[in-house]
Amino acid sequence: MSQWLHILCFQIFPYVAVTVLIVGSWIRFDRDQFSWRSSSSEMMRKRQLVIGSNIFHLAVIPLLVGHVVGMLTPLSWQEAMGITVQQHAMAELILGGSAGLVCFIGALILLHRRTFDRRILRTSSWSDLFILIVIVVILGAGIATLPYSWEDQQTGFTLLHASQWAQQLVVFNPNAWQLLTPIPFVYKAHIVMGLVLILITPFTRLVHIWSVPIWYLGRAYQVVRVPYRKGRRERESEWQSA
C-alpha cells in the first residue's frame, strides 16, 4: 500500500467512520425511531435463526470487548497488572481466535438462512444482506490473521503496532498511520473492513446495538401472564353484573 493510501485508510477514515456512527445514529433516532429495531425474521424460520443468532451473539460480545480493551489499554497499564506482551499475544491468539471461529460459524448460518430461504430473501433489504456479507468478510480476515499471530506470539510485534495505532488515534496523533505500515496486509484488510462496518451501522439494522437491554439482567422477577381458568358460571355472573 502506498503512503497516501495508508493515510486515507488509517488516519482519515477512522475519524470519518466514528463520526458517521455517532452523528448518523443520533439523527436516525431523532427522526426515524420506528426504524430503530433489529427487524427480526423469526416468524419465517425460527430454528436456524435461534441457532445462528445465539452462536453469533454469544461469541461477538467477548470478541468486541477483547478488541476494544486489548487495543486501547496502554502497555504500561498491562505491565502494572503483570501482563506481558507475550501473554497478551497468546490470549489474543487462543481466546480471540476461538471466539472468532464460533462467531464466523454463526454468521455463516445467518447468511445461509437469509440467502437460501426464498421468503426471507424476498423480504430482506439490500442492507440486510450487505451487513451479513461484510461481517463474514471481517471475521474471515480475522481468522486469516491467526497464522501470523502464531508466528508473532513471541514478540507481539503486530499486536503492539495495532494497539499503539488505536491509542494514538484517540489522542489525535497525525502520524498514527505510520504504526500500521510494517504489519501484514491481512491485518490491514481486517481493520479497514471493521471501519466500513462502523461506517454503515447507522443505516442498517445494526443500529439496535445502542438499545441492548442490559438492565434486564438486574430486573426483578415478574409474572408476565397468568392463565385464565375461571369457570363458565363465574364468567357469566361477571358479564351479568357488568
Image (cartoon, helix red, strand yellow):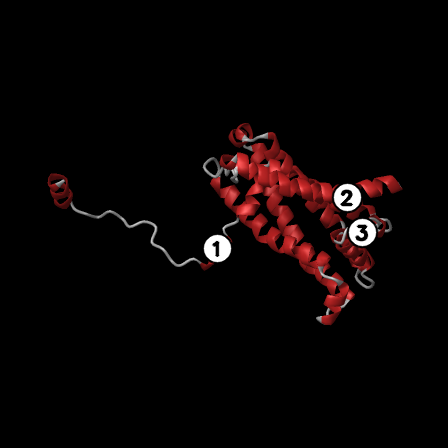
Question: Hey, what amino acid is under mark 2?
Answer: Ala
Question: Which numbered disc covers residue 97?
Answer: none
| Residue under the point 75% across and 61% down | 89
Query: Where residue 5 sits: x, y (%)?
Result: 84, 40
Task: Please tell me how crowded label 3 is: few (under 14), some (14-19), or many (20+) other residues with Cα within 10 Å.
Answer: few
Q: Quadrant of the C terminus?
A: top left
Which is nearer the N-term, disc 2 or disc 1?
2
Q: Which residue is mark 3?
A: 173
| Residue at x 51% of width, y 29% of height | 119
Q: Amino acid at mark 3?
A: Asn
- Tag 1 secondary structure: helix
Q: Nearer the viewer, residue 162 or 44?
A: 162
Q: Quadrant location of residue 137? A: top right
The image shows residue 73, relative to residue 140, as above or below, that is: below
Numbered tag placed on residue 189 in the rendering: 2
- 3 or 1: tag closer to the N-terminus: 3
According to the picture, the residue beneath numbered tag 1 turns out to be 215
Q: Is residue 202 left or right of residue 224?
A: right
The picture places residue 36, in percent across and down from the top left corner, at 52, 39
In the image: residue 3, left or right of residue 107: right
Give the left or right position of residue 29, taking residue 196 as reference: left
10 Å neighbourhood of mark 2: few (<14), some, or many (≥20)?
some
Residue with the most extreme top position: 122
Residues at circles 2 and 1 in contact by the CB criterion of under 8 Å? no
Res 137 visible: no
Q: Residue 139, position in %: x, y?
A: 68, 46
Q: Disc 2 or 3, which lies upstream in sequence?
A: 3
